Image (cartoon, grey):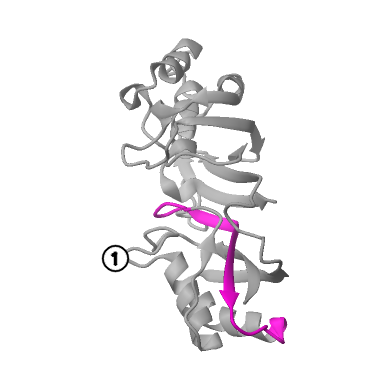
Amino acid sequence: MYRYQVLIEYDGKDYVGWQKQKNGKSIQSQIQNCISKILKEKIKLYGSGRTDSGVHAINQSAHFDTKETIINLFKFLSSLNHFLNPKKITIKKINKKKPSFHSRYSAKEREYKYIILNRNAPSVLENYKVWHLKKKLDLNSMKKGAKKLVGTHNFNAFRSSNCDAESPIKTIKKISIIKKNEKIIFTFRSKSFLKNQVRSMVGCLKYLGEKKWKDRDLDKVLNSKSRKFCAPPAPAHGLFLSKVIY
């Protein structure tokens, strides 16, 4: 068997998420079916992690095994994108890997970006790619709050009720918040995240930026370990899986 890694960019708007499901189209199934068709064998694609319905990716990482080596990777990539591009999916790169490589278990860190468009008028060019908020957000308040979330914590209050992770304890290695023209860009880095964790953290930081909350309110959420104290999660369409680090 031969193992290959693919780096994937996709628009998650019309999909139920990364993982193959019975209730709708998934990114995994679309790519898996195309690879199987081109290679003329049944292929199973393994992603670095799941992205939820509506979430996008700039550099999702995945791998698959095939019985025969792919002789012309450029031609293979071109054929894949011929079928996938109309579905708003593109394979940016393909690499041959050692059998020990695993897109999920070999990953050391994952990075997500969340984008808020902070201006009065909505965007017609980036609809479903940003969270549009009219009220001006206080950057310093959000940065101060973000520092409280960095490190190892019990993030039970920040995960969805149907999260299947064994432990709510995660280590956030980095959170950066920068303002670029009318956009506020959040970057979160950790080995792994709970379901809805990033969106929940953005929702809480947004409350701080709006002055709806003070620092002690965020402390209360973190210490409570209860979902009922958390702010509503930010919508999925502003979230991007930006990088997987090996």
Q: Is residue 15 above or below residue 180?
A: below
Task: Give amino acid for label 1.
Answer: Lys
- The percent position of residue 136, horizontal first and vertical second, equals 51, 29
Q: Is residue 155 above or below residue 236?
A: above
| Element under disc 1 | loop
Question: What's the residue at 36%, 67% (across, down)?
Answer: 25
Question: What's the residue at 49%, 21% (across, down)?
Answer: 208
- The percent position of residue 195, horizontal first and vertical second, equals 42, 42
Residue in the foreground of this view, choosing between 154 and 182: 154
Q: Residues within 10 Å of mark 1 (few under 14, many from 20)?
A: few
Tell me if residue 116 can be seen: yes
Query: Which residues, given as a range, are shown in magenta?
Result: 50-74
Tell me if residue 10 can be seen: no
Locate residue 113: give its quadrant. top right
| Residue extending farthest left | 23
Find disc 1 in the rendering and name its residue. Answer: 22
Is residue 149 found inside the magenta-colored segment of the image?
Answer: no
Question: What's the residue at 51%, 89% (across, down)?
Answer: 40
**9 displayed left or right of 100:** left
